[in-house]
Image (cartoon, rainbow, N blue to C red):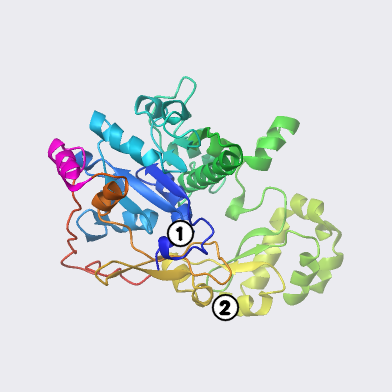
């Protein structure tokens, strides 16, 4: 199924031109594409297209990494050199029929490349220009490059992650990239909502730095109003709620989160220690926080009597609890498959890329499941749709403004050949 064939998809009819690469921007537009928007990736073939195509170590074929597939399924690819005057002319033709332009470039580049509303409003006054940069389009750092891990470091995240006596620790995932991409998609949709109501588009901005700072959330509010500098707690514990951390079992770990008072007596009874309910040092959050070490010792001693699986069976659905899985165990979890959390995304030649499904479910509608495009796969069709005839397209190709689609080259060896290896 393609987005165009299913008008029941929530974002069917939304056309987005995406001057994007790598992770944050493509992740944001992947939400839009999965929900039915027509997302047209603008790729500069002279630079090898989206750099994500070449991020290893796993590939389905040439210019087709697992990394790239993750962020770019259900999209179209148009090769275009925006630095060439003829490339700008082609882009302007596409802008006429687009709802939005999204870029994830350095903050000083959108205006220079004519990707902002001031540059495009004469062509399409309703166009919404959404900008995702490292440090914003204004201020002293607008021309700085930047990446996720740098933002985690400067926004204080590394001092909130890991064990108290260890070195600063980043998240295991590029969470700032992912959340900034989602913020950009949200901003784009908010802008399009206003533009469709008023007939006037605008610029919408977000940045990795601003999202990383925003993610400080309640520890940020605690500092700004109470002067409290939140640090790290042992075993990934919550800074103020106890028990809410990792605890040892006979063969591993459990994460238990009694984040409401009602769960403590339930946990005490299930662990065979109803006397904990009346212990004044364990009576409420304030007392348990004061005696966190005692709580940890008591729970460890009780939980180490049985393996993790026994405790999950006993506690699940009564007390908020989870096993600690590695990536393979997480993806092989029967509940993931019950939720159709892993799906196959189809290439035109019948091959499939297996990936994690979009977390948004639309009742009664299946989201599209098309693999990410070859570089330039839709160039000719999109140019023809925009009014270019065969001679004009041939001229653009001769000038190097656009390039034809690259033939698919399937990886020839190893577990990544042709099909994705199972999760």
Foreground mark, 1 or 2? 1
Task: Report the Cα–Cα distance between label 1 and label 2.
Answer: 35 Å
Q: Secondary structure at mark 2?
A: helix
Residue sitting nearer the eye, 226 or 366: 366
Q: Which of the marked residues, 1 or 2, is nearer the chain's N terminus?
A: 1
* Numbered disc total: 2
Q: Residue at x 55, y 65 (%)?
A: 361
Q: Which residue is mark 2?
A: 309
Question: Image quadrant for the N terminus?
Answer: bottom left
Q: Is residue 392 magenta?
A: yes
Label 1 Cα neighbours within 10 Å, binned few <14 / some 14-19 / many ≥20: many
Q: What is the x, y in percent for residue 10? A: 54, 59
Q: Is residue 57 left or right of residue 192?
A: left
In the rendered structure, which segment of residues is drawn in magenta? Answer: 389-402
At 39% from the left and 54% from the top, the residue drawn is 71
**Circles 1 and 2: CB distance less than 8 Å?**
no
Label 1, on which residue? 34
């Amino acid at each position: 199924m393609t987005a165009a064939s299913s008008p029941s998809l929530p974002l069917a009819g939304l056309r987005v031109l995406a001057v994007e690469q790598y992770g944050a921007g493509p992740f944001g537009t992947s939400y839009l594409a999965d929900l039915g928007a027509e997302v047209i990736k603008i790729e500069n073939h002279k630079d090898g297209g989206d750099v994500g195509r070449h991020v290893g170590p796993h590939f389905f074929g040439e210019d087709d990494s697992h990394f790239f597939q993750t962020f770019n399924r259900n999209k179209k690819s148009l090769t275009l050199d925006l630095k060439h005057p003829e490339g700008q002319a082609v882009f302007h033709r596409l802008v006429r029929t687009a709802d939005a332009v999204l870029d994830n470039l350095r903050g000083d580049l959108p205006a220079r490349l004519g990707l902002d509303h001031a540059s495009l409003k004469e062509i399409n006054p309703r166009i919404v220009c959404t900008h995702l940069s490292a440090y914003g389009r204004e201020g002293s750092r607008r021309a700085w490059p930047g990446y996720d891990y740098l933002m985690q470091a400067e926004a204080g995240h590394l001092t909130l992650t890991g064990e108290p006596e260890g070195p600063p620790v980043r998240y295991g995932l590029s969470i700032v990239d992912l959340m900034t991409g989602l913020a950009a998609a949200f901003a784009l949709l908010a802008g399009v909502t206003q533009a469709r109501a008023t007939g006037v588009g605008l610029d919408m901005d977000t940045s990795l730095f601003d999202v990383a700072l925003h993610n400080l959330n309640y520890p940020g509010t605690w500092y700004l109003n109470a002067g409290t500098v939140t640090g790290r707690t042992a075993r990934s514990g919550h800074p103020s709620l106890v028990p809410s951390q990792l605890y040892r079992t006979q063969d591993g770990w459990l994460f238990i989160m009694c984040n409401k008072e009602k769960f403590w007596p339930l946990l005490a009874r299930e662990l065979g220690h109803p006397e904990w309910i009346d212990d004044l040092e364990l009576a409420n959050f304030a007392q348990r926080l004061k005696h966190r070490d005692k709580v940890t010792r008591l729970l460890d001693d009780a939980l180490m009597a049985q393996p993790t699986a026994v405790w999950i069976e006993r506690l699940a659905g009564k007390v908020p609890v989870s096993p600690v899985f590695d990536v393979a165990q997480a993806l092989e979890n029967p509940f993931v498959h019950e939720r159709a959390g892993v799906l196959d995304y189809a290439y035109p030649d019948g091959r499939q890329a297996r990936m994690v499904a979009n977390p948004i479910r639309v009742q009664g509608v299946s989201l599209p499941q098309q693999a990410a495009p070859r570089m330039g796969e839709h160039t000719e069709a999109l140019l023809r749709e925009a009014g270019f005839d065969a001679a004009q397209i041939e001229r653009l190709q001769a000038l190097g403004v656009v390039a034809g689609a690259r033939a698919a080259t399937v990886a020839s060896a190893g577990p990544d050949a042709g099909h994705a290896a199972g999760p």
